[in-house]
């Protein structure tokens, strides 16, 4: 690993203007989708014990079909994309790879804090997997692609066979846990691999339209399979989660195509602020849900529609806050702390008056 002291001049950190808007928009959508999935956990933690029935069961089934696992896949995929961008800029600036390692260690610490707050933590595992991904980037790219696909597909296949097939092999729980981390690592590696091939670049040679169409065609029977498993059943929940990569790829490719249209890009552009502050907003969701949601549950069990309305309210508030914050500051609050810790230098936070806009 190259030592930073070898450089005669000290490069500065990336600027917000260097960001790829489409990635921020898609990340913003992923953060919103993750809240839709995590809300049932926060409801249970807040004391809601009633099993969903009737309309509630149907609503949560729809959430499973559309969101369960899909947005976690999108988020992990974009994490891998971010790793490629970050490492590329580090090398262009002559910075040491230890900067990236320090960044992952800070993420691990943030995950510990999020768990202490009572949230569902992925940050610690993401930080650890980010370090493993760094090692995988040393592999030849054909090998990296095969590792990514195998790691993404094998765990889900084993889980489905183990839980849905009575005659299926008994898979040890410890192995399933290890494979679960491997699954997320596969999603990250796939995001890294496709980003390196210019997935988000203008005029990319990656067949985005073909990926979207194939994923859409395959997603339809997956959705039918989920519905056929029965409303609110464990089997339906498992199928929706374990096949999430297929619709997840469709979401990413579809959003890339959609954001090529000026009208859609204009309508969805406000989500880039939400995505730029993904770190702050993710932990913010935990703080809001563990402090505010119990007050609603104490007043009575929340229906599925009420819970989703609460999610929508949180998302709207965070979107507005993100837009206002980034009008005055260059980075989100936690993003700024993360950046300063990553580079071991205080990065200017305030936006100059001439550059201030929404």
Image (cartoon, rainbow, N blue to C red):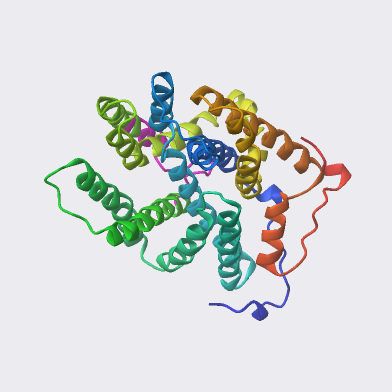
Q: Is residue 274 visible?
A: yes
Q: Residue 58, position in %: x, y?
A: 39, 22
Name the residue: 52% across, 61% down: 127
List the single residue furthest toward the top: 55
- Where residue 314 sits, quadrant-wise, is top right
| 278 to the left or right of 239 | right
Q: Residue 249, position in %: x, y?
A: 40, 39
| 246 to the left or right of 13 | left
Q: Quadrant of the C terminus?
A: top right
Of residue 79 and residue 125, the one placed in the foreground of this image is 125
| 51 to the left or right of 322 | left
Of residue 158 and residue 115, the one placed in the foreground of this image is 115
Q: Residue 248, position in %: x, y?
A: 41, 38
User: Is residue 165 covered in magenta?
Assistant: no
| 154 to the left or right of 52 | left
Q: Is residue 13 visible?
A: no
User: Is residue 208 covered in magenta?
Assistant: yes
Of residue 66 and residue 153, the one placed in the foreground of this image is 66
Name the residue: 47% across, 49% down: 76
List the single residue furthest toward the right: 353
Q: Magenta region, mostly helix, strand or loop? A: loop
Q: Is residue 335 above or below residue 231?
A: below
Q: Which residues are magenta?
A: 197-214
Q: Is residue 209 above or below residue 166?
A: above
Q: How many marks?
A: 0
Q: Is residue 254 above or below residue 289?
A: above
Name the residue: 65% across, 65% down: 342
Name the residue: 60% across, 26% down: 262
- Where residue 292 sits, quadrant-wise, is top right
């Amino acid at each position: 690993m190259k030592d930073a002291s070898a450089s005669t001049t000290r490069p500065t950190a990336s600027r917000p203007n260097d960001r790829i808007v489409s990635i921020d928009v898609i990340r913003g959508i992923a953060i919103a989708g993750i809240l839709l999935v995590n809300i049932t956990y926060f409801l249970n933690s807040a004391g809601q014990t009633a099993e969903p029935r009737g309309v509630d069961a149907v609503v949560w089934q729809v959430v499973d079909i559309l969101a369960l696992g899909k947005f976690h896949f999108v988020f992990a995929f974009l994490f891998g994309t971010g790793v490629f961008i970050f490492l590329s800029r580090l090398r262009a600036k002559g910075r040491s790879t230890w900067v990236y390692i320090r960044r992952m260690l800070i993420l691990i610490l943030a995950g510990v804090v999020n768990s202490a707050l009572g949230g569902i933590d992925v940050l610690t595992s993401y930080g650890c997997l980010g370090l493993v991904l760094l090692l995988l980037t040393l592999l030849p790219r054909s090998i990296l692609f095969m590792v990514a696909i195998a790691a993404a597909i094998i765990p889900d296949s084993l889980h489905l066979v183990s839980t849905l097939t009575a005659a299926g092999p008994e898979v040890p729980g410890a192995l399933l846990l290890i494979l679960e981390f491997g699954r997320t690592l596969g999603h990250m590696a796939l995001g890294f691999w496709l980003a390196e091939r210019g997935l988000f670049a203008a005029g990319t040679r990656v067949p985005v339209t073909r990926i979207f169409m194939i994923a859409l065609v395959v997603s339809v029977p997956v959705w039918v399979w989920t519905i056929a498993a029965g409303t609110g059943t464990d089997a339906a929940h498992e199928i929706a989660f374990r096949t999430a990569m297929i619709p997840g790829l469709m979401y990413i490719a579809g959003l890339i195509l959609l954001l090529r249209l000026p009208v859609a890009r204009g309508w969805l552009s406000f989500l880039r602020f939400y995505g730029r502050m993904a770190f702050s907003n993710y932990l913010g969701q935990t703080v809001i849900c563990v402090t505010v949601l119990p007050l609603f549950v104490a007043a009575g069990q929340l229906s599925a529609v009420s819970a989703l309305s609460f999610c929508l309210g949180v998302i709207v508030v965070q979107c507005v806050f993100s837009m206002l914050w980034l009008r005055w500051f260059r980075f989100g609050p936690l993003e700024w702390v993360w950046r300063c810790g990553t580079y071991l230098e205080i990065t200017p936070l305030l936006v100059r008056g001439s550059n201030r806009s929404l």
